[in-house]
Amino acid sequence: MGLLDQLAGQVLGGMVGGSGGGGQVDLMKIVMSLIQIQEGGLGGLLGMFNQAGLGQQAASWVGTGANMPISGDQLQSALGADAIGDIAGKLGMSTGDASGALANLLPGLVDQLTPQGQVAEGDALSQGLAALAGKLLG
């Protein structure tokens, strides 16, 4: 089973709480778009965590060791209340639920996108995210 199959299985298999797979797929699409549209891609997104004082957590997701958890409140401080509010609106859930779901998903996603312990930018990451989106929607 490939990396993308494993990641899609984790997400669709209940890594994120909620009823039905539709909300999980929507959350995954939002996280993927968040990475893709962020200036600097995944590295830029991780930079936001560094600026919010959460660099140690973000580094653990990229590294090959255990992933440190992050709370919904910490995630909101890194990404901003407006961004979390927009995501919550798209998902039809409260900001607390959205930030909690993202906090549960993001460490594992970053870990899966950085299997060698390094952030791969550019075409390789874009291709990986596009392939993952195809698996989730297919």
Image (spheres, helix red, strand yellow):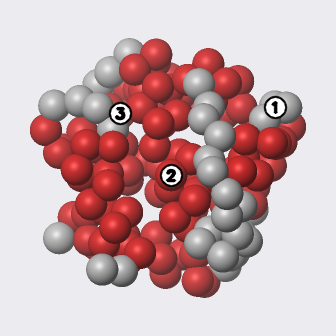
* Marking on residue 32: none
View extreme (left): residue: 20
Give the CA distance from mark 1 to mark 2: 20 Å
What residue is shown at x 32% (from left), y 55% (from top)? 10
Give the CA distance from mark 3 to mark 1: 24 Å
Quick one: label 2 or label 3, which is nearer the N terminus?
A: 3
Using a 10 Å C-alpha cutoff, classify the residue at mark 2 as few (fewer than 14 neighbours), some (14 to 19) or many (20 or more). Answer: many
* Marking on residue 108: 2
Secondary element under disc 2, as helix, strand or loop, is helix
- Residue 130 percent location from the top left of the image: 41, 74
Q: Mark 1 belongs to which amino acid?
A: Ala
* Residue 26 in sight: no
* Labelled pair 1, 2 in contact (Cβ < 8 Å): no
Compared with 128, 106 (above or below) is above
How many numbered circles are shown?
3
Secondary element under disc 1, as helix, strand or loop, is loop
Q: Mark 2 belongs to which amino acid?
A: Gly
- Residue 63 percent location from the top left of the image: 71, 61
Front tag of 3 and 1: 1
Q: Nearer the viewer, residue 116 or 127?
A: 116
Quick one: label 3 or label 1, which is nearer the N terminus?
A: 1
Quick one: label 1 or label 2, which is nearer the N terminus?
A: 1
Q: Quadrant of the C terminus?
A: bottom left
- Residue 128 percent location from the top left of the image: 47, 77
Secondary element under disc 3, as helix, strand or loop, is helix
The residue indicated by pointer 3 is 90
Q: Nearer the viewer, residue 132 or 109?
A: 109
* Marking on residue 52: 1
Q: Mark 3 belongs to which amino acid?
A: Lys
Q: Is residue 132 left or right of residue 36?
A: left
Q: Is residue 87 left or right of residue 70?
A: left
Q: Nearer the viewer, residue 31 or 62?
A: 62
